[in-house]
């Protein structure tokens, strides 16, 4: 087994880590059974460190030494107040403390040392921010094998890579502190970002703030004037009521003894709350529209919309997104875990732990058979979803031929010899004139990648089945990459050779046919028609001696044209003859 690779969502508010275990992507829970860890770090005066929930608990007593949302500072030059906030550390070092804790939890869960990681970043992160994230990982002792985009991870967790080539996905990610909308398109098996828009200062925290401020005002208080600890209590209650209103139509906001004496309590309805949220939701929808414009897409050209981030649990948010894209959003995944899960799936694909699952859904390389002239004739193109089947009819190339050899090939090259042979079968048939035998060839690829090649002699109805035991889809990524690269590298010469071979086959078929036709109808032709045919024939013969595919192709076309009238006259003659015979 290869070295396992973990997937990490290093979020603004929360982080999580996962690994593919026995073929399944799993998020790893800490000693308290929690799979989600707040991205919070407490650093004591003496340098002691606490992370996650423990760090958050310090907020009440030592709020000034608790760092949250450090992600916003990654890869940026900190100003004086940022430096104060970071307690003399860099953003990378603080992020590294979170990543160290995740490493500890994962190693404890898995019972072994883990070294390699895939870490997610927002699609809008520039190179400096990505590099800073990578360095944070390294500081924590990880070998960061890949930095991937969060929306890509989200799309993977929803299985949207199965939608196939050119499928477009909108990922609406609304968390605690940030919002982004990214439109992805699947190109050659990987998601490409078509456009992304967002707001790094817009998230669920703003909603808590709005509600706390409004409630304090109703209670006759100036929120900003409250002591930090009091503000924290109002914010916590606001968040609780906010989350409750995602589930219920009304909820009581209550602050017992908010100033040590008085209590405050009021009933809030979802309807009221939605009105307060409206401008804020409208800002996210404006971003969606900008992203669509940038990608030059209409909403209906997007094939799937997925929601990630805790704040997408708000029904009004979901409704607004669905209205904007004109389709029901996919909410089948856990909004807080989707990115970490997708990162884990990606990591599993890289380590090979998920190869089976991933490669089984499409053919990694084209499947076909060799035809006349040593050409590759593709029956199932690369990236076809399996199970699938495809077939074609073939005929004999020579008079009196008794059998046809079917060579089953895999690969992307134009010439059969450059592809891999998976197997071969000889199909016997009754001797027939050239082009008279009819042999059907059908490929069936089952969900396990087993290829069954069925051949049928149409004249007799006799079937033959060749089963390729080795899975046709279980090809290593390296070999697939090599084959695809070679096909790109040799694209021009391969194409030239195909054009040449096809033209040569056509010429070799045409020349004797014309000799035969001239033997019958030479006398019916005008002098200039005869001359044109002879000239064209010479041109083809001379072109056959060279190796210029285009020249041969045009010579063959010219010969085709020159013999049109001869062919027509012969057909007419035959018809006359036939009618004459039947009439007598
Ligand atoms: P994330 O950054 O993705 O972990 O999202 C965290 C944000 O989601 C916080 O602002 C939470 O208050 C918010 N959130 C979580 N659950 C709900 C819910 N049921 N309704 C509204 N907001 C929620």
Image (cartoon, rainbow, N blue to C red):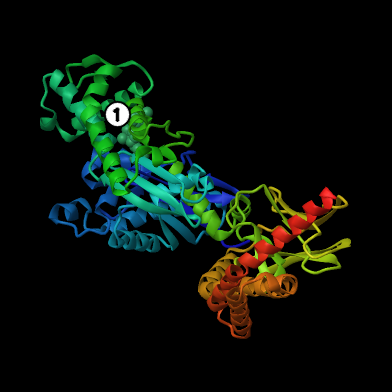
Ligand 1 lies under 8 Å from the Cβ of mark 1: yes
The reply, left or right, for residue 9 in relation to residue 201 is: right
Which quadrant of the render holds ligand 1?
top left
In this image, 191 relative to 540: left or right? left
In front: 438, or 23? 438
Looking at the picture, tell me which residue is in the foreground, 543 or 229: 543
Crowding near the residue tagged with mark 1, few <14, some 14–19, many ≥20 C-alpha atoms within 10 Å? some
Q: Which residue is pictured at 65% across the width and 67% down the height?
A: 566
Residue wearing tag 1: 239
Image coords of residue 137 (percent x, y): 39, 60
Question: Where's residue 525, x and y in %?
Answer: 65, 71
Which of the 4 image quarters holds residue 237?
top left
> For numbered disc 1, what is the local secondary structure?
helix
| Above or below, comparing residue 357 to residue 324 in the picture | below
From the top left corner, tell me how far across and down residue 557 is, in percent.
57, 70
Residue, far front: 584
The one nearer the camera, 270 or 105, is 270
Where residue 246 sits in the image (x, y, percent)?
A: 35, 24
Tell me: residue 361, above or below residue 374: above
Camera sees residue 29: no
Q: Residue at left 63%, top 53%? A: 356
**Residue at the image position 33 percent from the left and 39 percent from the top:** 175
Q: Is residue 223 visible?
A: yes
Q: Is residue 247 above or below residue 11?
A: above
Q: Residue at x 37, y 46 (%)?
A: 183
Left or right of residue 505: residue 264: left
Viewer-side residue, 576 vs 149:
576
């Amino acid at each position: 087994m290869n070295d396992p690779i973990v997937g990490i969502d290093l979020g603004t508010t929360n982080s999580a880590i996962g690994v593919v275990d026995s073929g399944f992507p799993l998020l790893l829970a800490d000693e308290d059974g929690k799979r989600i860890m707040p991205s919070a770090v407490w650093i004591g005066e003496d340098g002691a460190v606490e992370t996650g929930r423990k760090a958050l608990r310090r907020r009440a007593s030592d709020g000034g030494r608790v760092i949250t949302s450090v992600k916003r500072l990654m890869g940026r030059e900190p100003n004086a107040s940022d430096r104060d906030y970071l307690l003399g550390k860099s953003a990378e070092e603080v992020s590294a403390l979170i990543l160290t804790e995740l490493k500890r939890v994962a190693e404890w869960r898995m019972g072994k040392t883990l070294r390699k990681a895939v870490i997610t970043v927002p699609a809008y992160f520039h190179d400096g921010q990505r590099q800073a994230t990578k360095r944070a990982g390294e500081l924590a002792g990880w070998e960061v094998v890949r930095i991937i985009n969060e929306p890509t991870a989200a799309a993977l967790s929803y299985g949207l890579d199965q939608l196939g080539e050119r499928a477009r996905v909108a990922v609406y990610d609304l968390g605690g502190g940030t919002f982004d909308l990214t439109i992805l398109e699947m190109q050659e098996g990987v998601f490409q970002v078509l456009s992304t828009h967002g707001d790094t200062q817009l998230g669920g925290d703003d909603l808590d703030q709005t509600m706390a401020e409004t409630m304090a005002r109703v209670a006759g208080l100036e929120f900003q004037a409250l002591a930090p600890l009091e503000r924290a209590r109002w914010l916590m209650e606001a968040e609780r009521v906010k989350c409750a209103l995602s589930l219920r139509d009304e909820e009581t906001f209550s602050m017992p003894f908010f100033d040590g004496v008085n209590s405050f309590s009021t009933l809030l309805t979802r309807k009221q709350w939605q009105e307060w949220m409206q401008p804020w939701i409208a800002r996210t929808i404006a971003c969606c529209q900008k992203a669509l414009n940038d990608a030059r897409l209409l909403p209906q050209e997007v094939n799937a919309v997925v929601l990630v981030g805790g704040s997408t649990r708000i029904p009004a948010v979901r409704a607004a997104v669905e209205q904007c894209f004109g389709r029901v959003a996919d909410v089948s995944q856990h909004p807080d875990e989707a990115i970490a899960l997708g990162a884990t799936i990606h990591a599993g694909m890289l380590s090979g732990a998920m190869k089976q699952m991933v490669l089984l859904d499409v053919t990694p390389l084209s499947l076909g058979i060799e035809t006349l002239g040593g050409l590759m004739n593709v029956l199932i193109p690369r990236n076809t979803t399996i199970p699938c089947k495809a077939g074609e009819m073939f005929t004999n190339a020579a008079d009196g031929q008794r059998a046809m050899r079917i060579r089953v090939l895999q690969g992307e090259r134009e010439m059969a010899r450059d592809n891999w042979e998976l197997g071969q079968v000889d199909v016997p048939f009754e001797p027939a004139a050239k082009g008279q035998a009819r042999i059907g060839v059908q490929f069936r690829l089952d969900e396990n990648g087993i290829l069954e090649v069925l051949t049928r002699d149409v004249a007799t109805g006799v079937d033959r089945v060749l089963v390729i035991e080795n899975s046709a889809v279980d090809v290593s990524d390296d070999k697939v990459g090599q084959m695809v690269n070679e096909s790109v590298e040799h694209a021009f010469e391969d194409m030239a050779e195909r054009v040449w071979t096809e033209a040569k086959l056509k010429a070799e078929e045409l020349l004797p046919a014309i000799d035969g036709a001239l033997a019958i109808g030479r006398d019916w032709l005008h002098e200039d028609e005869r001359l044109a045919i002879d000239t064209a024939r010479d041109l083809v013969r001379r072109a056959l001696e060279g190796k210029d595919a285009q020249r041969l192709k045009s010579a063959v076309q010219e010969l085709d044209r020159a013999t049109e009238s001869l062919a027509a006259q012969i057909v007419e003659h035959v018809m006359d003859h036939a009618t004459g015979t039947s009439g007598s």
